[in-house]
Image (cartoon, helix red, strand yellow):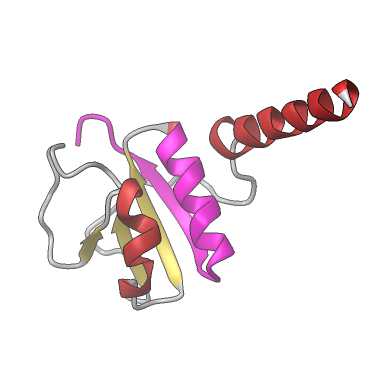
Amino acid sequence: MLTFISILLIILLLTFIYSRYLPVFGVKAQVLQDNHESDVRIVDVRDYNEKVDQAHHRLHIPIAYLHRFYHEIDGKRVHVIASSQIEKNMSIRFLRRKGYKVSGYTLCNEC
C-alpha cells in the first residue's frame, strides 16, 4: 500500500513538472510584428495589471481565466503572448488540448 501511494505521488509530481517547466515542442518563438498574418489570432495571456498594449487585434485573456473564456478565441490558429516560460507552456498546452493550432509565441517581459 505504501509503494502504491509513493508511486502515485511521484506520477503526480512528474505531471506537475512536465506541464509547467518542460518546453512545448513544435512551437517557435517569433517576434510579433504589426503586419502579422490576418488568419492568426493573437492571444495575450499576461495578467491584467501588467502593461498591455491595447491593440484592437489582440485578445487579452489572462492565463487564470483562459479555461473560462477560451471559446472567445475566434480563429483556429493562435499566437500566444506571455510574460514567463510557465505562462507560455501552460497556455500553449491548454489551447492545443482545446483544438487550436499555436503558430508561435512571444515572451514579453518589458513590452
In the image, residue 93 lies in the stretch drawn in magenta? yes
Q: Which residue is depicted at the point 63% across and 51% down?
A: 26
Residue 17 percent coordinates (x, y): 62, 29
Give how far across and how far down residue 30 sits, in percent: 42, 47
Q: Position of residue 95 (x, y in %)?
A: 49, 60
* Residue at 73% over, 27% down: 9
Q: Nearer the viewer, residue 8 or 21?
A: 8
Q: Is residue 23 left or right of residue 48?
A: right
Residue 44 vertical placement versus 74 (above, below) = above
Of 13 and 66, the residue lying toward us: 13
Q: Does 70 appear above or below 39? A: above
Residue 82 in sight: yes
Q: In the displayed structure, would residue 41 be above or below residue 64? A: below
Which residues, given as a range, are shown in magenta?
86-111
| Quarter placement of the C terminus | top left
Image location of residue 110, percent across then percent down: 21, 30
Residue 47 occupies quadrant: top left
Q: Name the residue located 55 percent from the left edge and 52 percent from the top edge.
A: 93
Asked if residue 22 can be seen in this view, the reply is: no
Please tell me how many numbered marks the rendered image carries.
Answer: 0
Q: Quadrant of the N terminus?
A: top right
Q: Residue furthest front?
A: 1
| Nearest the eye: 2 or 74 | 2
Q: Which image quarter: residue 36?
A: bottom left
- Where is residue 83, by image quadrant? top left
- What's the residue at 64%, 46% (across, down)? 25
Please state if 29 lies on the left or on the right of 107 as rendered: right
